[in-house]
Image (cartoon, grey):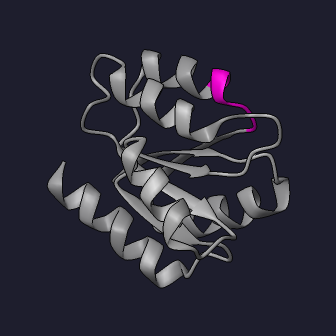
Amino acid sequence: MNRILIVDDDPISSLSLIRQLEELGHIVTSVDDTQKAIDIARALPPTTVLINIYLQGIDSYSFAEELRSLPRCDKVNIVALTHASDAESSINAMRAGCDDFLKIPVDLNLLKNKVNDTADAA
């Protein structure tokens, strides 16, 4: 079982992911800004963080770097979610510390496999 933190300012996208992941038995928390996410990660590091790279008014790449630098968060699985499918977005996400990159709308089978692989490794 994973503790999954979703960082997305689109409540409809978040709700869809929450439902799917909870049905798989994971504990899911969703926030709409990165400061709340950092506070949660400091208190109890999640196993996986799903972050929408294009949050309004927020540099999501800097968030990924900050999250990765927190004590006990160096092993957190960070998955960038985006509508973009260009190589530059993927490269920027990886440079910032993201472990993976998925295009929105998220293929739930791909996401399920990535989340379950992380749970198996924990």
Mark count:
0
Q: Quadrant of residue 62?
A: top right
Residue 87 horizontal/vertical position (percent) = 49, 71
Residue 66 sits above or below residue 117 on the image? above
Residue 10 sits above or below residue 20 on the image? above
For the residue pair 106 and 98, the one nearer the viewer reads as 98
Residue 115 sits above or below residue 61 on the image? below
Q: Residue at x 38, y 52 (%)?
A: 94
Q: Quadrant of residue 72?
A: top left
For the residue pair 76 and 22, the one nearer the viewer reads as 76
Q: Going by the picture, which residue comes out furthest to the front?
A: 88
Q: Residue at x 52, y 56 (%)?
A: 80
Residue 23 horizontal/vertical position (percent) = 54, 68
Please give left or right for residue 15 compared with residue 26 in the image: right
Q: Is residue 107 visible?
A: yes
Please give left or right for residue 103 compared with residue 66 in the image: right
Q: Going by the picture, which residue comes out furthest to the left?
A: 121
Q: Residue at x 55, y 82 (%)?
A: 107
Highlighted range, magenta: 32-36
- Say if the magenta span includes residue 22: no
Please give left or right for residue 116 compared with residue 52 in the image: left
Q: Quadrant of residue 13?
A: bottom right
Q: Is residue 26 visible?
A: no
Residue 3 horizontal/vertical position (percent) = 42, 43
Residue 7 horizontal/vertical position (percent) = 64, 43
Prevalent SS, magenta region: helix
For the residue pair 88 and 119, the one nearer the viewer reads as 88
Residue 121 sits above or below residue 43 on the image? below
- Say if the magenta span includes residue 33: yes
Q: Residue at x 66, y 35 (%)?
A: 59
